[in-house]
Image (cartoon, grey):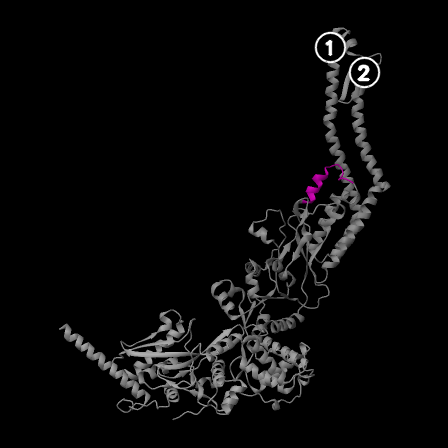
Amino acid sequence: MPIDPLPPEALFTRCDAAAFDFATTDELAEIEDSLGQDRAVEAVQFGIAMDCPGYNMFALGPPGAGKHAMVRRHLKEAAASAAPPSDWAYVNNFEEPHKPKVLELSTGRGWPLRDAMEKLVSELREAIPAMFESDAYRGRRETVDEEFKSLHEKSFEEVQARAKEKNIAIMRTQMGLAMAPLRDGQVLDPEAFHKLPEEEQAQTRRDIEELEQQLQDVMRKAPQWQRTHREKLRALNREMTEYVVGHLIDDLKKRYADLPKVAAYIDAVRRDVIENARDFVPQEQPEGGDAAEAMARRGGPGVVPGGGDAAFRRYQVNVIVDRGGAEAAPVIYEDHPTHPNLIGRIEHVAQFGALLTDFNLIKPGALLRANGGYLILDALKLLQQPYAWEELKRALRSGEVRVEGLGEQLGVIGTVSLKPEPIRLDVKVVLLGDRQLYYLLAEHDPDFRELFKVAVDFDDVVDRTGANTRDYARMIATLARRDRLRPLDAGAVARVIEHAARMVGDSEKLSARVRLIADLLHEADHFAGRDGAKVTTAVHVQRAIDAQIRRGDRLRERIQEQITRGTVMIDTDGAAVGQLNGLSVLQLGGFAFGQPSRITARVRMGRGEVVDIEREVELGGPLHSKGVLILSGYLGQKFARERPLALSASLVFEQSYGGVDGDSASSAELYALLSALSGVPIAQGFAVTGSVNQHGRVQPIGGANEKIEGFFDICRARGLNGSQGVLIPAANVKHLMLRADVVAAAEAGQFRIFAVETIDQGIEILTGMAAGAPGDDGAYPADTVNGRVQAQLDAFADKALRYAAAARGEDR
């Protein structure tokens, strides 16, 4: 039965603007959630509700599907009902300065502690010097000093007294203390001494040796007396400092008595202040000791040395996460997830040719800023940053964040740095990415499925139902209002919805890629502005669509120009045996277009193989080769069930110099093959697309709209004559959303589009001859395409059998 061309209404499914109950989008309410993403919304809500380790989320879907906006909106709603999490601060570890301690404080108490510590240090810098200048301190200090002085002088005086009894003088010289004999109160010179009797000289020498021994005993005791003196001074300083600072520190400790770790830190501050009270006295060295020793005792790599206030940096509080004023849990998006931006970093300062640091230079990363809430990351950006992915997994597995420099982890920096105490981590991470990246991680990273157990799968399309169409209009209104665009009238909304169906190549679906729709609205608004219009109309939307095509179709124009000039040989009229126009789609960036290709077939007697020349020269992909191999199965089951398929055929895409893949040309190749076998010419005004199975049924393909329009453009350039058209699979009719000029040409009878279900239907349209059905004996009528194919194959088989018999006779 002859097949009629598709009617114009089957080529394009209009969106009736009259069906809308609004004049412009200003009258529409905004839509709260992503259109048609119920599955994704349920997954996000499930992931938020699951308070168990590993239930982080991966939002997967095409770019521009609104993943970030939808996920962020639901996270914000969940965060609004959660209490703000803790503040976090790093403080000095007075015992091990290179291992700073971390303090967890209830919400909003971090900065008050920092301010309180600054105030405390300021008060101590006034109170402690005043204490050292007080009469009470001076009096007690003088008592200690006098005790030491009197002890030293008393011992020396005893030696002097014994020396006087023995007529020995103790004198101070540049070389130290010296002794000499006395006579009549005068020191004897060596000449006078040698004039004394020998016995007296010997006694004097014995007396001097005895006195020198006594003096040495006094000198040996002096260091011990000095140590005792220093210890007493330190004890005095501690006692007096404790008295002065005790009430100041106690007042501060009472304010944080509910936080044991903070209270313990304040006690450590008390001990350090008491031990280093002299640091608060301007231009004074530590009492009774070496300044370098004191600096080393409290410094190490954890203190940046310097003058002035540098010594008091050890009492500062480095608040790295402050929730003051927050009313909800944080929702953080890190756009540049490098290792430092994600985990945190330890900064250094250069001093005297060395890099130095302390706990005040610890900076937080996104994980700490999002701690207690939610963190959103772009998966591809994360994976592109060295070691960021591994560090994120380690933090999620361990439940804590260790702020370390990447160079120190890798061992490439020899500078002594810090090892801060890790911070407890409680965060829900959401990764954004496409499906390919999700499945690659799931397949190749064993940790991924354990840490990201919730897949938030965004649909590419939504059903084009009446309800969804109305919601789509609301979405358009929402986008226009959000981006402060002109309102769109009902006609413009209808044209956008029609284009959304064309974007996905399906008259029954609409694109869910919100970003692309937003781009179209912006561009239509631009054209409305150029016209001075207050409302965007369908004309402006169409101009934006045309402009998008114009910007991307340079290559299409060049290819079509080569065809119309005859450089690439494509016939659009006449008839030829074993030759047909196939259709393919080229996708370049965001622009896709169809182009025809000449497919030719040649047959001869052989052993039943169909040679795919594209495959033989390694230009054909596996899907194309599969489609060609199916042709042998079709021919065998239809024409050679009881006789050998004595056929050798070759198929080729003429003037094809690039790779060919996909099976959408397999029906065209089969038509060309049937024409070559039957000798029946095919009308060259037709182009064909569609794959075929071994039963001869034509199967749907992709890019139907682009393929039809690509051939239509060639035919129109050469002149439409009413005999031209395209054959598509019947299953592709629902995908048609053709351009208005194609629909108009079809309505005028200048261009025809046929939907076929079987190869027999298609061959009849292409040749104008009946395909032919087998009779009771299985034979096809002679004056049909199948009958002629059968006759040719039978002739090949008979000839092959004769050759085989002759060959056997020669063998005998």
Q: Dot 2 corresponds to which residue?
A: 165
Q: Would residue 647 be counted in the magenta stretch?
A: no
Q: Is residue 184 above or below residue 640?
A: above
In the image, taking residue 294 as reference, residue 382 lies left or right, namely left
> 570 or 546, which is in the foreground?
570
Amino acid type of the residue tagged 2 in the rendering: Glu
- Judged from the image, the secondary structure of the residue bearing numbered disc 1 is helix
Outermost residue toward the right? 135
Measure the alpha-carbon separation of dots 1 and 2: 17 Å
Task: Return the x and y of residue 747 as percentages of the image width and height.
Answer: 51, 91
Task: Return the x and y of residue 625 as percentages of the image width and height.
Answer: 37, 74
Q: Is residue 644 above or below residue 108?
A: below
Task: Return the x and y of residue 718 as percentages of the image width and height.
Answer: 47, 84
Task: Return the x and y of residue 431 as percentages of the image width and height.
Answer: 57, 67
What residue lies at 77% left-to-right and 23% top-to-bottom? 174
| Residue 512 visible in the current orientation | no
